[in-house]
Amino acid sequence: MAEKDSDFYSHKLPSASQVFEELKELWGMALPITAAHFMAFFRAAVSVMFLGRLGNLELAGGALSIGFTNITGYSVLVGLASGLEPVCSQAYGGKNWDLLSLSLQRMILILGIAIVPISLLWLNLESIMNFMGQDPKITAMAATYCVYSLPDLLTNTLLQPSEGFLKVTAGDQTHNVLLLVGCCFPRAIELCSCRGDGVGGPRGGIGVRRD
């Protein structure tokens, strides 16, 4: 026991410069990831801003639909696609390029099959919510939002596997920069449209419009 204690205290504490360099490397990896995921989740906030300009009914229906689609759709796709990263890591480390590309193609196919029952569930949102006792007007608006969200399922069948594939093959920094740029441009266009002559007209800020 005494030998273990002496071994523990014999290790030198890191210097201030070493701690600073370590923190600098950690921040260099964490900041792009944080910014990229913030912009990805900011999409829902921008959608709510648009709906707020339309009215209370549209805002309530959109909020209900966003929660429903996140739980029943996007979370399922993200969970399925998360299995691609360890397989790609092993294939990339072993320089098995055939397995690497085949894994990406198989995951896209799996997600393509998965969106079929998800789409059917989204198309039946109105009947499901009415069965659960929700307000019929809000439910009808949520169903309309769900129908127009269906193309986003198709894009996510390509986005989620590509994200894991790039994270392994292109490195974390390249992946994070690409994800950040890809999320920033649509959000900037949406915000400019929301504040300009887009949804709700040119007047006022972002929020619920009161007539």
Image: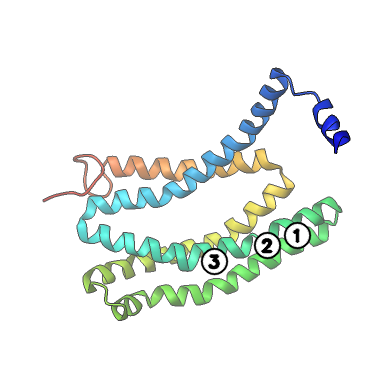
Residue type highlighted by circle 2: Gly
Task: Residue 173 in the image: state x and y as whole percent.
Answer: 66, 38
As helix, strand or loop, the secondary structure at mark 1 comes to: helix
The residue at which mark 2 appears reads as 83
Position of the N terminus by quadrant? top right
Among the two numbered marks 3 and 2 on one chain, the one whose residue lies closer to the N terminus: 3
Looking at the rendering, which quadrant does residue 143 occupy?
bottom left
**Label 1 is placed on what type of residue?**
Val
Residue drawn at point x = 54 percent, y = 60 percent = 156
In-image side of 203 versus 145 (left or right): left
Mark closest to the chain's N terminus, 1 or 3: 3
Q: CA distance from mark 2 to mark 1?
A: 7 Å
Position above or below: 188 against 15: below
Residue 184 position, x and y percent, is: 48, 41
- The label number, if any, that marks residue 117 in the structure image: none
Asked if disc 3 and disc 2 are in contact, CB closer than 8 Å, the reply is: no
Residue 35 vs residue 192: left or right?
right
Task: Find out whether the residues at labels 2 and 1 contact each other: C-beta distance under 8 Å.
Answer: yes
How many residues crowd around disc 2 within 10 Å: few (fewer than 14), some, or many (20 or more)? some
Q: Which residue is mark 3?
A: 76
Q: Secondary structure at mark 3?
A: helix
* Marks 3/2: CA–CA distance: 12 Å
Is residue 187 visible from the viewing direction of this image? yes
The residue depicted at 41 percent of the width and 40 percent of the height is 188
Q: To which residue does mark 1 refer?
A: 87
In the rendered structure, the answer to whether residue 97 lies left or right of residue 144 reads right
Between 51 and 17, the residue placed more toward the observer is 17
Check if mark 1's residue and mark 3's residue have beta carbons within 8 Å: no
Q: Are there few (<14), some (14-19), or many (20+) residues within 10 Å of tag 1?
A: some
